[in-house]
Image (spheres, coloured by chain):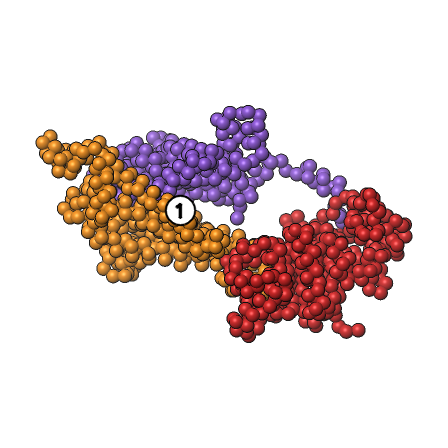
Chain colours: A red, B purple, C orange
């Protein structure tokens, strides 16, 4: 088996607050190979965005990052210098953000901002950077690409701006692209186009893609691997087939019940909800973090929770099958 | 405890500090505001009690004891801060000077506050043509050089306390108008104003009971700023010889009178200027503090 | 953009005319300008003669129209005191004030902007606290007092710089500091607030994600956006500073337009005072107009609309 492009073991993120340390992300493990798409799903505040910023080295100074291992193509990111990280960012690993409306600098033209991404890392002429920008704008489906270069962000629609962001991320042909809910701010019709584009480009350019989303419909269509996050932990990871066919963690099943799935949800059936709220993560967190909302919670859930692995499929639960077989209606 | 359950966090919310407790905490946790307020209160007390606190008559000249140095420069306790070029007790003149500065600051801020607030609230609430006219007037006012116009008017009308107060009051309304206009525009869009309109409240009633209470905190902040501004301007006018006239003990005038002896007796200039600086600093600190304390979301 | 400039220009002209009317009206505040001019000892006949000589017997609006018409051609009448055309009197003095104003705003910008930027990059650091102290003290400092202290320390005690006059560039150092310090606090606060605001924006994160280094992020991406409002504030401050030059010029005996204003006011030389108020207002109007245009040009959102 070849070395994965990205390998993360026991990533922890702590935020000191007035009332104690907030353990925002606790012990995340995953691997990602070239050409694969990993979808990280979970509700808002589950630590998805923080995890992606941690990979890029873009966390605020107040957040403490620890990991047993966090390597990108063999480079240990936790010990990499600022300069090393800077040479990776934009060149070999790129990121696309949630807010296309505000993620572009209002003071510079699209052309300037696209060219900058290339000029920062490659010894190319302005003209070459410009040509590359036009090429990529066309690739992400923007018409009249050349004339767009002299436009400013405020002159473009949200969908166009996000396409520009994608083109910008692709300028240096990165090996890894992280897209943090790239479509939440966009119209539904545009969402599908953008995600399709991202997926196709990943395949075509053999890039590893991390797509952060809470849209399980999207996951089903584009993911190779899925990682389900809840309250700062990866509760379940695995190939997309396993996650949808044999969702093992009670939270994963809860999530799946919340969305209508073609062929699985009966017409007129009531969609599920997960009662309760996410617990506070300030102070020591022990046992299963989902137990306050889990229908199967027992006293043992307060203790250590074993990680249960079956090939690439892994989840954390006190029950060997995650009580999968007692919820017949969803498993197939 | 490992994880806070829903129940616990709810309890936390219920047993949290009350708004009044939080306000008290913010006030006493804010050093700048506290220091400013204490200094301002002390100086106000000094100004009010001037006749009892001042060791001498501030106007009494004594040719025998002119320019005696203050205690810390070798003078005696008869005149703790020395005497000026006419032998008048410096401390007593400073104490009476506090009356001039505070009176001018307060009354000028009051006059300009009434004018500016009326204009600003009208512009912000009615919008349209009223707003256009007020905005235009603000532009005109900002284009006029304050010091120059104030000096010219005082020179024409004569430099009495009333004239100085009147001129400053009529000149310093611009910031009131700008801030009150913006605040009113914000408040006007809120639901409770629409609600009051729906139940048929009259315009004056809406302005007084819905708008004013919600822009009052901004108003207080501007009052402190303009009070400080008026005090500094009076001092500058008096320093230039075209403000309050001698022998009135204005701090700016005292600096001006001491200026000629500055080479040999620099304290004559330093002391009144320092007192002026401390007063204005105190008012500004209190104003900045008020902004933080009353509107924590505006804190930088 | 063109439409914006034209609209803004129209407003500037309207403000200018209103200001001109107000500064002209000042003459009539005293009730009878002829009597004021003649002095207390003048006889009734003398006052009448003066009234006719200067045309005070005509309706006020006619006098204003007359004055404005001449003023537009650069003729502000004759100074009562100097017996010279006001226009040439002011022209002689204006260069000193302009030099002082330009030096003052340059000094203010060169100190306030870097301090504000550093304070924003490192909030609550030592530099942030120093910057805050400088700005709080600056707002409370009576400029005439500050000027006198500088004279005592640097001119008299240390003997490094001349205390007054305009002979060499060294004469301008202390006045520049006093005048510049007047504008510093506001510029610094706005720079700091603007930088803090911009630094937390999404596009700064984008710039970092591209691999831009911190210097590039701060200057090319952040300051470029944060500086836009500072430009118009600086212009406004420049206008205020020229108006405030009267205090500084009188302390340092700089014979500029501000000093002339002080002399003319003390001597009841109304034509000169009127002209100076109008000219200082015009400076303010022109500066703010240019600032708005520059602002619109710096901000692509306004430039392209």
Q: Nearer the viewer, residue B165 or B34?
A: B165
From the image, tell me which residue sits under label 1: C7
The reply to whether residue C10 is in sight is yes
The reply to whether residue B219 is in sight is no
Secondary structure under badge 1? helix
Task: Count the marks.
Answer: 1
Residue A215 is situated, as x and y percent measured from the top left of the image, at 73, 53
- Residue drawn at 15 percent across, 38 percent down: C54
Q: Give the letter of the chain under mark 1.
A: C
Residue B88 is situated, as x and y percent measured from the top left of the image, at 26, 38
Q: Nearer the viewer, residue B49 or A167?
A: A167
- Residue drawn at 33 percent across, 45 percent down: C13
Q: Is residue A142 above or below residue C76?
A: below
- Residue drawn at 70 percent across, 56 percent down: A192
Quarter of the image where the C terminus of chain A is located: bottom right
Q: Say which quarter of the image contains residue A162.
A: bottom right
- C276 on left or right of C112: left
- B66 on left or right of A130: left
Q: Residues within 10 Å of mark 1 (few under 14, many from 20)?
A: few
Residue C157 is situated, as x and y percent measured from the top left of the image, at 29, 57
């Amino acid at each position: 088996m070849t070395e994965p492009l990205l390998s993360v073991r026991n990533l922890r993120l702590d935020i000191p607050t007035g009332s104690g340390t907030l353990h925002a992300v606790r012990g995340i493990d995953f691997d990602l190979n070239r050409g694969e798409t990993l979808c990280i799903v979970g509700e808002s505040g589950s630590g998805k965005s923080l995890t992606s910023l941690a990979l890029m080295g873009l966390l605020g100074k107040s957040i403490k990052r620890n990991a047993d291992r966090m390597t990108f193509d063999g480079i240990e990111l936790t010990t990499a210098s600022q300069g090393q990280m800077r040479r990776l960012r934009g060149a070999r690993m790129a990121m696309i953000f949630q807010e296309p409306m505000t993620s572009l600098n209002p003071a510079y033209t699209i052309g300037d901002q696209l060219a900058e991404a290339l000029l920062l890392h490659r010894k190319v002429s302005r003209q070459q950077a410009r040509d590359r920008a036009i090429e990529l704008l066309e690739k992400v489906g923007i018409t009249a690409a050349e004339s767009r270069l002299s436009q400013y962000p405020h002159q473009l629609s949200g969908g166009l701006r996000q396409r520009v962001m994608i083109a910008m991320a692709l300028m240096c042909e990165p090996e890894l692209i992280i897209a943090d809910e790239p479509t939440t701010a966009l119209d539904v019709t545009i969402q599908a186009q953008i995600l399709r584009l991202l997926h196709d480009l990943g395949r075509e350019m053999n890039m590893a893609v991390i797509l952060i989303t809470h849209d399980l419909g999207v996951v089903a269509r584009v993911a190779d691997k899925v990682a389900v996050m809840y309250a700062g932990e990866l509760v379940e990871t695995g190939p997309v087939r396993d996650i949808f066919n044999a969702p093992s963690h009670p939270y994963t099943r809860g999530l799946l019940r919340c969305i209508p799935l073609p062929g699985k949800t009966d017409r007129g059936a009531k969609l599920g909800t997960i009662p309760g709220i996410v617990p506070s993560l300030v102070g020591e967190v022990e046992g299963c973090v989902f137990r306050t909302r889990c229908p199967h919670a027992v006293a043992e859930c307060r203790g250590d929770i074993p990680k249960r692995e079956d090939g690439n499929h892994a989840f954390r639960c006190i029950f060997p099958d995650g009580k999968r077989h007692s919820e017949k209606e969803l498993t197939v | 405890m490992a994880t806070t359950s829903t129940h616990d966090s709810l309890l936390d919310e219920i047993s949290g500090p009350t708004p009044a407790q939080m306000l008290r905490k913010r006030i006493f946790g804010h050093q700048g505001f506290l220091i400013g307020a204490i200094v301002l209160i002390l100086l106000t007390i000094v100004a009010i009690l001037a006749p009892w606190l001042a060791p001498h008559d501030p106007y009494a000249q004594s040719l025998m004891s002119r320019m005696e140095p203050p205690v810390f420069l070798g003078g005696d306790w008869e005149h703790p801060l020395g005497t000026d070029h006419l032998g008048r007790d410096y401390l007593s003149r400073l104490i009476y000077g506090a009356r001039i500065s505070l009176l001018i600051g307060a009354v000028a801020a009051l006059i300009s506050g009434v004018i500016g607030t009326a204009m600003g609230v009208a512009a912000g609430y009615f919008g349209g043509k009223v707003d256009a006219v007020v905005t235009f007037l603000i532009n005109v006012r900002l284009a006029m050089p304050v010091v120059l116009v104030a000096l010219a008017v005082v020179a024409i009308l004569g430099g009495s306390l009333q004239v100085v107060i009147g001129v400053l009051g009529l000149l310093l309304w611009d910031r009131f108008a700008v801030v009150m206009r913006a605040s009113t525009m914000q408040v006007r869009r809120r639901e409770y104003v629409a609600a009051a309109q729906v139940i048929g409240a009259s315009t004056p009633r809406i302005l007084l009971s819905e708008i004013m209470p919600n822009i009052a905190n901004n108003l207080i902040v501007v009052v402190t700023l303009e009070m400080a501004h008026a005090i500094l301007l009076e001092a500058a006018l008096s320093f230039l010889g075209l403000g309050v006239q001698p022998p009135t003990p204005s701090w700016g005038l005292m600096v001006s009178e001491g200026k000629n002896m500055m080479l040999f007796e620099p304290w004559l200039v330093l002391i009144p200027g320092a007192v002026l600086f401390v007063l204005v600093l105190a008012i500004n600190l209190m104003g900045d503090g008020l902004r933080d304390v009353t509107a924590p979301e505006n804190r930088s | 953009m063109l439409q914006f400039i034209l609209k803004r220009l129209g407003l500037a002209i309207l403000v200018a005319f209103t200001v001109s009317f107000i500064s002209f009206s000042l003459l009539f505040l005293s009730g009878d300008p002829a009597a004021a001019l003649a002095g207390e000892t003048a006889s009734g006949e003398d006052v009448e003669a003066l009234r006719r000589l200067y045309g005070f017997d005509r309706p006020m609006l006619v006098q204003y129209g007359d004055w404005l018409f001449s003023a537009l051609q650069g003729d502000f009448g004759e100074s009562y005191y100097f017996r010279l055309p006001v226009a040439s009197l002011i022209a002689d003095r204006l260069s000193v004030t302009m030099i002082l104003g330009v030096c003052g705003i340059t000094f203010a910008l060169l100190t306030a902007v870097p301090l504000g930027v550093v304070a924003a990059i490192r909030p609550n650091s030592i530099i942030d606290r120093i910057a805050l102290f400088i700005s709080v003290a600056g707002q409370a400092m009576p400029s005439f007092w500050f000027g006198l202290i500088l004279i005592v320390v640097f001119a008299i005690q240390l003997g490094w710089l001349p205390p007054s006059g305009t002979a060499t560039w060294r004469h301008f150092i202390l006045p520049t500091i006093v005048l510049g310090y007047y504008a510093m606090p506001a510029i610094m606060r706005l720079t700091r607030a603007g930088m803090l605001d911009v630094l937390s924006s999404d596009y700064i994160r984008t710039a970092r994600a591209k691999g831009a280094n911190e210097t590039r992020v701060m200057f090319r991406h952040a300051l470029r956006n944060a500086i836009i409002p500072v430009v118009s504030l600086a212009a406004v401050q420049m206008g205020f500073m020229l108006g405030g030059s009267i205090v500084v010029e009188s302390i340092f005996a700089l014979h500029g337009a501000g000093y002339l204003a002080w002399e003319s006011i003390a001597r009841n030389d109304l034509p000169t005072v009127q002209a100076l108020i109008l000219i200082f207002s015009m400076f303010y109007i022109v500066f703010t107009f240019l600032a708005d245009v520059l602002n619109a040009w710096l901000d692509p959102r306004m430039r392209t609309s």
